[in-house]
Image (cartoon, rainbow, N blue to C red):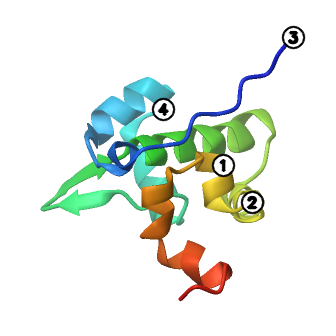
Amino acid sequence: MVKKKPEARSAADHEPVYTIGVVARLLKVCPATLRIWERKGLVKPTRLGKNRFYSGCDLERLKAAKDLIQKRRLNIEGAKSVMKLTRCWEVRKCAAEVRASCETYKQILGHA
């Protein structure tokens, strides 16, 4: 079996386009769960007025968090800790133009 390399994420994956209701349906969780995860720092959606909008990258992060919390039985703080162990660009496979504008990426690599 040949494993495919994950495709690099484009700048479009970082565009906040999904509403909380859409994300809740995709993840099969209630919107209140997403609000709790936001308050606890698992994800920071873009806010426009009172509305939250999630990007494709936010959605991937939330899928990982859900797996850690529900399947691996970690609490929210445990899930946050596990998710911090891996550099985000290794998980998200960001495109070069996205990494080039990422402050954290530049700081860690000593380019800032």
Q: Earlier in the sequence, mark 4 or mark 1?
A: 4
Distance between mark 3 and mark 4 Cα atoms: 33 Å
**Amino acid beneath label 4:** Val
Q: Earlier in the sequence, mark 2 or mark 1?
A: 2
Distance between mark 2 and mark 1 Cα atoms: 7 Å
Seen at 12% across and 62% down, the residue is 49
The image shows residue 17 at horizontal and vertical percentages of 25, 41
Disc 3 marks which residue?
1
Nearer the observer: mark 3 or 4; the answer is: 3
Distance between mark 3 and mark 2 Cα atoms: 26 Å
**Amino acid beneath label 3:** Met
Q: Secondary structure at mark 4?
A: loop
Q: Earlier in the sequence, mark 1 or mark 3?
A: 3
Residue 29 circle label: 4
Disc 2 marks which residue?
86
Name the quadrant of the N terminus: top right
Disc 1 marks which residue?
91
The image shows residue 111 at horizontal and vertical percentages of 58, 85
